[in-house]
Amino acid sequence: MNKLIAVIILSSSLMGMDISIVERERHSITVEVSIANPQISHYEIGDRSLNLPRWSDAAFSYHPQLEKIVPVFTIPILLPPDGVLPQIEILQSQLSPDQRLPRQIHRNTFAPDMELPLIESEQMISVMADEDFRSFNTARILIMPYAEKDQRLEKITFRLTFPDNSPAGSSQDLDLISTYLNSDMASNWAKIAPASLNRLSQTLPSGQWYRFPVNDMGIHRINANSFPGTIPSSNPASWQVYAPNYEGKSLSFELSNTAPLPDNLKAISVQTKGLEDGVMSGNDEILFFAQALNGNFKSNSFTHLYG
């Protein structure tokens, strides 16, 4: 028997949505979504047992007005640099009778550790702003197949229309945004020019610099074998290790909004062993904690360089 706990992300062999692009225009995109007949699974919530319709690509949310747990499909889209949401126009919809969505369930029935995302809209399809993806504004199309009482959505055709006066942004690699529904029209909607992210701090100390790739999170070491040629002759106790400002963590929301960009590199803490004699040799080493780039971009070949 399945336990319904925390935020539910379903896993099943049944995929729900079949998405196809019907028409692309400069400022609009027409989409058709077909939704398969769901499987029914049994869950326990507190002292209640429920049979809930499920698809592998839908997530459960709680609707406080209806007091129901409802499955919701999401489709990610990109927004123009000004973040204006598109207009949604339903061109056609097809429903069938379906009374398998359970009746009301009060929120106080949930276990203390159970947190389902809330959905406020009672519309069959809606759009809401989402977190930034790198330098892009994003949103989610929400499709609620049981929005109509005792009816289930089987197919819907809708048009997304973006303002025709949306400001242009910077262009970026299409591979980076290919998973978004409207990636073709959004290739120049990035809010930050890529070159502006590649600058170095103007306050970095002068001296000889080396780069060390970091592919995994953990403790890393620099020793005599880390250098491609001659070991620097300066006192290793004076060496500093610098990391990218975000150190592998997800970029903050402010990076692509109004907050000033931080320096790309910052000094990080190190621990040294055997450097009291002022020479890097033998088993001497510098230890530091670092983690690789957070994300799955293109061929997974991205690494952070520490210097």
Image (cartoon, helix red, strand yellow):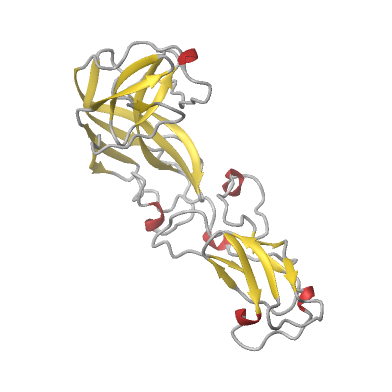
Name which residue lies at 57% across and 59% down. Answer: 291
- Drawn side of residue 292 relative to residue 224, left or right: left
Name which residue lies at 61% across and 45% down. Answer: 254
Name which residue lies at 79% across and 80% down. Answer: 235
Residue sitting nearer the eye, 67 or 223: 223
Name which residue lies at 44% across and 20% down. Answer: 120
Residue sitting nearer the eye, 297 or 277: 277
Give above or below for 295 relative to 265. Answer: above
In the rendering, at what x and y percent does residue 72 appear? 35, 28
- The answer to which image quadrant residue 16 occupies is top left
Residue situated furthest bottom in the rendering: 230
Where, quadrant-wise, is the N terminus in this rendering? top left
- Drawn side of residue 77 relative to residue 194, left or right: left
- Drawn side of residue 219 relative to residue 15, left or right: right
In the rendering, at what x and y percent does residue 233 appear? 75, 86
In the rendering, at what x and y percent does residue 172 appear? 44, 58
Give above or below for 182 relative to 247. Answer: above
- The answer to which image quadrant residue 35 occupies is top left
In the rendering, at what x and y percent does residue 269 appear? 72, 61
Total numbered labels placed on residues in the image: 0
Where, quadrant-wise, is the C terminus in this rendering? bottom right
Residue sitting nearer the eye, 220 or 248: 220
- Drawn side of residue 8 relative to residue 289, left or right: left
Give above or below for 44 relative to 166. Answer: above
- The answer to which image quadrant residue 99 occupies is top left
Give above or below for 287 relative to 189. Answer: below
